[in-house]
Each structure stands twice: as C-alpha cells, then as structure tokens.
Amino acid sequence: MSGGEEDVQNLTTRLHKLQTTSEGGGGDTKNTKVDDACRFLFNVKERFKDDTNDVFSSFIDNLLKLKSGSKSMNEVCHETTIQFREHPDLLLEFAPFLAGFSQERPSS
C-alpha cells in the first residue's frame, strides 16, 4: 500500500470512528456526513488516479498538515482550488467536506 493510500485509509478510519463514537441524537445526520466525506475522498482518488502530478497524495498531505496545524485553512483552500481548478464538481464538494473536517479537528 502506498503512502497516499495509507493516508486515505487513516482518514477513512478516523471518519468511521467519529461516526461510531457519536451514536445518539442526530446519528443519522452524522452518518450521512461521514458517508459523504468518504465518498468525496473516493471521488478525488478516482479522479486523479492516473495523474502524474500526484494531486491526490498532495491533497491528502495538505489535509494532514491542516489537522496538525502546520498549514492554515486558507493555505489548504488556496492550494486545493489550484489543484481542482479543472474539476468544478470537486470544488463544490470540497467546501462542505472541509467544513466537516475542520469541525472534527482538535482546537489548538
């Protein structure tokens, strides 16, 4: 398994853990958000699977840097906008994904 695939696996696992630890009120909404996030990551991976610039790995790396605090939300948004510039459908899906991702991040 390549580093990018491991990163996706880790993000997907984290999303599913978030889903299973938040049982209770609003669970269906949480489940839908987690499913949407997983679907978005899968769509990005599929879209860029043959890309020689390795956009997908770079995208995952940016998310991990956002999570760790080594990149700001503005930096990640800017870089992702450039990476997805020819994929407006992914850009539309990115905003809600990022909102959910940033809510799940621990505050610093």
Image (cartoon, rainbow, N blue to C red):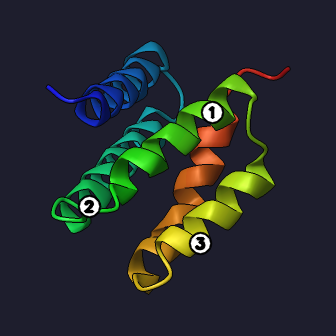
Q: Which residue lies furthest to the front in this view?
A: 52
Q: Name the amino acid type tagged 2.
A: Asn
Residue 10: quadrant of the picture: top left
Report the residue at 51% width, 74% height from top: 91
Q: Name the amino acid type tagged 1.
A: Lys
Q: For this view, does 66 lie left or right of residue 1?
A: right
Numbered disc in front, either 2 or 3: 3
On screen, 63 above or below 39?
above
Q: Name the residue under label 3.
A: 81
Q: Where is residue 71 in the image (x, y as percent from the top left)?
A: 74, 39
Q: For this view, does 1 lie left or right of residue 79?
A: left
Q: Tell me, yes or no, whether the two marked residues, 3 and 1, touch with CB atoms within 8 Å.
A: no
Residue 2: quadrant of the picture: top left
Report the Cα–Cα distance between label 2 and label 3: 16 Å
Q: Which label number is shown at residue 65?
A: 1
Q: Position of residue 90 (x, y in %)?
A: 42, 72
Q: Which of marks 2 and 3 is nearer the N terminus?
A: 2
Would residue 104 be seen by someone viewing this image from the given angle? no
Q: For this view, does 105 lie left or right of residue 100?
A: right
Q: Mark 2 points at which residue?
A: 43
Give 18 or 2, whichever is nearer the viewer.
Answer: 2
Q: Position of residue 107 (x, y in %)?
A: 81, 23
Numbered disc in front, either 1 or 2: 1
Report the residue at 52% width, 54% height from top: 97
Would residue 9 be seen by someone viewing this image from the given angle? yes
Q: Earlier in the sequence, mark 3 or mark 1?
A: 1
Residue 69: quadrant of the picture: top right
On screen, 92 above or below 44?
below
